[in-house]
Amino acid sequence: MDNIPTFEEFFGSLPEKYRTNEVMEKVKYWYDREVANMKEYAARATQPEMNLSLFRDTGSYQIIAEGYVFDRGKPYDPGKWNWHLVNDSQSLYGFGMVLDKERLEVSTHH
């Protein structure tokens, strides 16, 4: 199962005031890079599942989107949880993309 929005959908999920050419170039760079990474990890999986959320406002100084690749063909281990309280026994790759609303910088975090 894949849920990867087009760049237009992804960028369009930002609040209108952040949809500038300056921000678009930064988001496009990271979008292309992370989607390529997701596809690379998915190619190694027996039953890949890719997901990239749209942006959501955290209510503070950040707007974030999150992406992951799971291999649903790997055994599920009910005892393997990460510090986000997500079971990552089938996880291959994950990241968050952050837009700093004040500085208009875009970064990713793994």
Image (spheres, grey):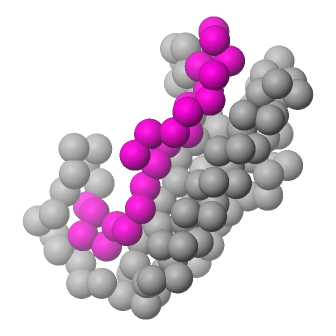
**Where does the image place residue 90, in percent across and percent down from the top left?**
31, 73
Residue 108 showing in the rendered view: yes
- Residue 55 against residue 81 in the figure, above or below: above
Q: Quadrant of residue 87?
A: bottom left
Could you tell me which residue is drawn at 80 percent across and 35 percent down?
A: 25
Q: Is 48 situated left or right of 78 in this image?
A: right
- Residue 76 against residue 28 in the figure, above or below: below
Q: Quadrant of residue 38?
A: bottom right
Which image quarter is the N terminus in? bottom right
**Where does the image place residue 70, in percent across and percent down from the top left?**
42, 71
- Residue 103 against residue 65 in the figure, above or below: above
Q: Residue furthest top?
A: 102
- Residue 110 against residue 64 in the figure, above or below: below
Residue 49 showing in the rendered view: no
Q: Is 89 situated left or right of 91 in this image?
A: left
Q: Nearer the viewer, residue 28 or 84?
A: 28
Region of the chain picked out in magenta, as a range? 87-110
Could you tell me which residue is drawn at 51 percent across and 39 percent down?
A: 108
Q: Is 81 situated left or right of 90 in this image?
A: left
Q: Is 14 situated left or right of 45 in this image?
A: right
Could you tell me which residue is drawn at 79 percent across and 52 percent down?
A: 7
**Where does the image place residue 13, in percent across and percent down from the top left?**
76, 38
Is residue 36 found inside the magenta-colored segment of the image? no
Could you tell me which residue is drawn at 65 percent across and 38 percent down?
A: 55
